[in-house]
Image (cartoon, rainbow, N blue to C red):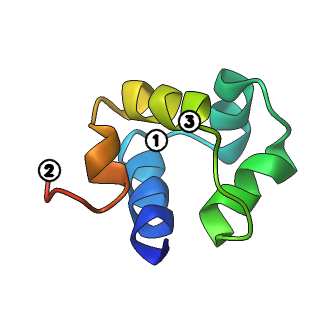
Amino acid sequence: MKIFQERLLEQRKLNKLTQQQVSEYLHITQPSYIRYENGSAEPSLENLVKLADLFDVSTDFLLGRTQY
């Protein structure tokens, strides 16, 4: 899941969002979101889709299955 962590962080920064802003969008705590970025937790399918929508990318991109 290293690629997921990298792309999640990259997309958050490209979109100029804070971890707090993303966690509020997902309706989870900031520490829960931080665990997504550091690889100690994986998002639910629902939150994976929300992240893809927020960053306007595909879930396949976030998961490293496509280049874009």
Q: Earlier in the sequence, mark 1 or mark 2?
A: 1
Report the residue marked by disc 1. 16
Residue positioned most to the front? 45
Looking at the rendered structure, the secondary structure element under dot 1 is loop
Report the residue marked by disc 3. 45
**Mark 2 Cα-neighbour bin, 10 Å: few <14, some 14–19, many ≥20:** few
Q: Nearer the viewer, residue 29 or 45?
A: 45
**Mark 3 Cα-neighbour bin, 10 Å: few <14, some 14–19, many ≥20:** few
Looking at the rendered structure, the secondary structure element under dot 2 is loop
Q: Earlier in the sequence, mark 1 or mark 3?
A: 1
Q: Look at label 3 and name its amino acid.
A: Leu
**Place of residue 26 in the rendered image (x, y in percent of width and height, measured from the top left):** 67, 27
Mark 3 vs mark 2: in front: 3
Residue positioned most to the bottom? 2
**Place of residue 31 in the rendered image (x, y in percent of width and height, measured from the top left):** 85, 52
**Place of residue 22 in the rendered image (x, y in percent of width and height, measured from the top left):** 63, 35
Q: Say which quarter of the image contains residue 6.
A: bottom left
**Place of residue 25 in the rendered image (x, y in percent of width and height, measured from the top left):** 65, 23
Q: Earlier in the sequence, mark 3 or mark 2?
A: 3
* Above or below for 45 versus 1: above
Mark 1 vs mark 2: in front: 2
Taking the spot 58% from the left edge, 27% from the top edge, the residue there is 46
Determine the CA span between mark 3 and mark 2. Answer: 20 Å
Determine the CA span between mark 1 and mark 3. Answer: 24 Å
Taking the spot 39% from the left edge, 49% from the top edge, the residue there is 11
Report the residue marked by disc 2. 68
* Above or below for 47 versus 66: above
Q: Is 14 left or right of 36, judged from the image as shown?
A: left
**Mark 1 Cα-neighbour bin, 10 Å: few <14, some 14–19, many ≥20:** few
